[in-house]
Amino acid sequence: MMKNFLLLLFLFLATLVQAQNVDLKKLDNYFEKALADWGTPGMSVAIVKDGETVFSKGYGLMEVGLETQPNGNTLYAIASNSKAFTSYIIAQLINEGKLNWDDKVKKYLPYFELYDPWVSNEVTVKDLLCHRVGLGTFSGDVIWYKSDLTSEEIIRRLKYLEPAYDFRDGFGYSNVMFITAGELIKTVTGKTWGQNVQERILDPVEMDRTVFSLSKLDAVGNFATPHAFEDGENIPITYTDWEEVGALGGLISSVNDMAKWMSFMMSSESIAKNQLWKMQNSYTVNRNDSNDFNMHFSGYGLGWGLSDYYGRLRVSHTGGYDGMISAVTMIPDEKLGVVVLSNGMNPPTMAVTYYALNAFLGEEENDWSQELLKKKQERKTKDTRVNDRVESRVEGTAPSLELEKYAGMYVADIYGNISVKLEDGVLRMYFEHSPELSATLQHWHYDVWKIDWDNTHAWFNFGTVKFNMDNNLKITGLEFDVPNDDIFFDELKPKRSE
């Protein structure tokens, strides 16, 4: 017994000495240089150890063209790092006896339907949170992206999405299932997801600089501006309203507040104590062979990504919002956590995270910034999707029909109406539920038109739309081609409305 006690005491003291020996100034310099090398406008970083925030600082600019610098209290959209808050609320409801992990979703949302009636009846609360219902990664995001649809209206459209896998037989990262989880929370509690987050997490954890609504930004102040990245430049853009779909990624927070969240999640005070293992248990698992972290597995729990990191459990998630990228990483056994929030599309979030983790864990030092930047540049070079389309353009062609023949209403089952109008001699496109996606159509070749968006978008810029016709040159529908990795316009498949 005494030997065990002495061993635990030795390990505790060794950890304490190790944390004290970390050169925080060296980390500070590294973070600053990494941001400059990656060319992102700004970021903030916080590190927690043993329940304390041991580092917190902002770097760069809150907005390109202005001189204001971010700090530890600067707000950024944390996007999908909000998913852990959603799963935590559900864990609380389970503790309160109001839900069970294996409850069928249709018990609470009778209108819930997917691609197959049997699957629709079998999907459980747990299935919503671990990305295994059979949909492909990001499938259906085009339904809610920048739209005014309610959560229920979005959910009612999911039956039109095509599966990528059999039920529970593949990992497909599904934002729309978290929208469903948010609506389930609302149904069970009688309060919105945002109200639940405020009352159940933000207030008790004293996260007083975290909001779920854009309407609260001005009152809170000190918030960074998101930036798109186009033609090698960071372009300031406006915030996108995600409040209605907040359960998938609606929180806007600071690294100081997220440090409180990480410390809370790694403490014994976590109110979902007896449910925490459920959240941090992998329901989809991949075997990893060759990697930089002696990692043997990676998978997904309930709102958290899971893996081993040099032999230790790693609980983490990233988030992508229009013009902002975030990363939250915890090593629970070491009571160690790192959060990086940024206001650009090319931030060194993981480079900063790995460098900080390795310093505190005593692992081999590595220049993650240069290594990951090189890999990112290589991936960018290999991504020739837009260039291939530009090079394939056939010059000197003309549309098959007069312009007015292309104008009309087109209906997508998963979305709604998309109208094409002839205005002042040019074709214009309007999305019924997404005014920000309006665009001018410029003839590209044959019956294909280039989409010139009215607004700058973070996830895509180049795109075309083809007017499909039958053998008698009667237009039957639209076919989108907007190459990007996040918003799949090709899922729309609008048909011409008579």
Image (spheres, rainbow, N blue to C red):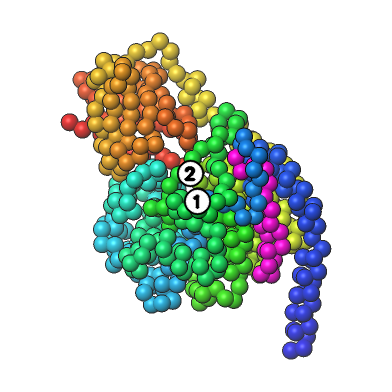
The kind of residue on which mark 2 rests is Tyr
Picture residue at 26% right of the left edge, 15% below the top: 402
Furthest residue in direction top, as rendered: 396
- Disc 2 target residue: 239
Which sits in the foreground, 309 or 24?
Answer: 24
Question: Split into 4 quadrants, where in the image is the C terminus?
Answer: top left
Determine which quarter of the picture holds residue 335: bottom right
Classed neighbour count for the residue bearing mark 1: other residues with Cα under 10 Å, few (<14), some (14–19), many (≥20):
some
Which one is earlier in the sequence, the residue at label 1 or at label 2? 1
| Left or right: 487, with 113 as reference point | right
Q: Is residue 59 magenta?
A: yes
| Left or right: 25, with 476 as reference point | right
For the question of whether residue 376 can be seen, the reply is no
Which sits in the foreground, 409 or 131?
Answer: 409
- Count how many numbered circles sit on residues in the image: 2
- Disc 1 target residue: 217
Classed neighbour count for the residue bearing mark 2: other residues with Cα under 10 Å, few (<14), some (14–19), many (≥20):
some
| Left or right: 45, with 88 as reference point | right
Picture residue at 54% right of the left edge, 36% below the top: 236
Q: x, y (%) of residue 25?
A: 79, 54
The kind of residue on which mark 1 rests is Leu
Furthest residue in direction bottom, as rendered: 1
Give the magenta range: 45-63
- Would you place residue 248 above or below residue 407 in this image? below
Q: x, y (%) of residue 60?
A: 67, 43
